[in-house]
Amino acid sequence: MDAFKKFTGGNTQTTGATGTNPQQPGEKKDLGDKIAGFVNKKEGNRASDTQIESGTDKVRGLYEKATGNKVDPKISN
């Protein structure tokens, strides 16, 4: 998972007692963020919600660029 940390910015510093950044009011996690957060938790990594969001946004962008198709908003917005 070192590659995941590097991909999401490589910063392992966290804020708060729980090790994650609080989510902004009105901001909902999409399915891609939830899956990435689950994998992050199960692997024992300490990537913050902001890092996970950034990583999933990059992956979505790469997918859209490679295929020319938009990702369904239910999966990633």
Image (tube, rainbow, N blue to C red):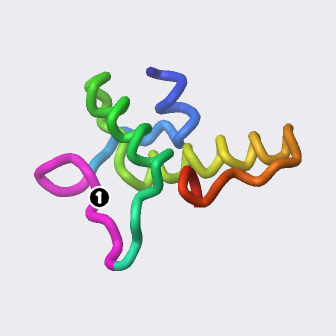
Res 21 → quadrant: bottom left
Q: Looking at the image, which is closer to me, 16 or 29? A: 29
**Residue nearer the viewer, 13 or 31:** 31
Residue 31 vertical position relative to residue 63 in the rendered view, above or below: below
* Residue that lies at the very extreme toward the bottom in this rendered image: 26
The amino acid at mark 1 is Asn
Where residue 34 appears, x then y in whole percent? 39, 46
Q: Magenta stretch: dominant SS?
A: loop
- Depicted 24 relative to depicted 72: above or below: below
Number of numbered callouts drawn: 1
Q: Is residue 40 left or right of residue 4?
A: left
Decide whether residue 57 is among the magenta residues. no
Which of the pair 42/47 is nearer the observer?
42
* Magenta part of the chain: 15-25
Q: Residue at x 36, y 41 (%)?
A: 37
Which residue is at 27% across, 26% downward? 42
Quarter of the figure with residue 47? top left
The quarter of the rendered structure image containing the N terminus is top left
Per the image, label 1 sits on a secondary structure element best described as loop
Residue plotted at (37% across, 52% down) = 49
- Indicate yes or no whether the magenta region holds residue 21: yes
Instruction: Left or right? Give the position of 57 relative to 10.
Output: right
Please indicate whether residue 54 sits to the left or right of residue 21 in the image: right
39 relative to 53 in the view: left or right: left
Q: Where's the C terminus, which quadrant?
A: bottom right
Query: Residue 75 location, x and y as percent?
Result: 55, 50
What residue is pinned by disc 1? 21
* Disc 1 packing (10 Å; few <14; some 14–19; many ≥20): some
Residue 56 lies in quadrant: top right
Residue 52 horizontal/vertical position (percent)? 45, 46
Residue 38 appears at what percent x and percent y? 33, 36
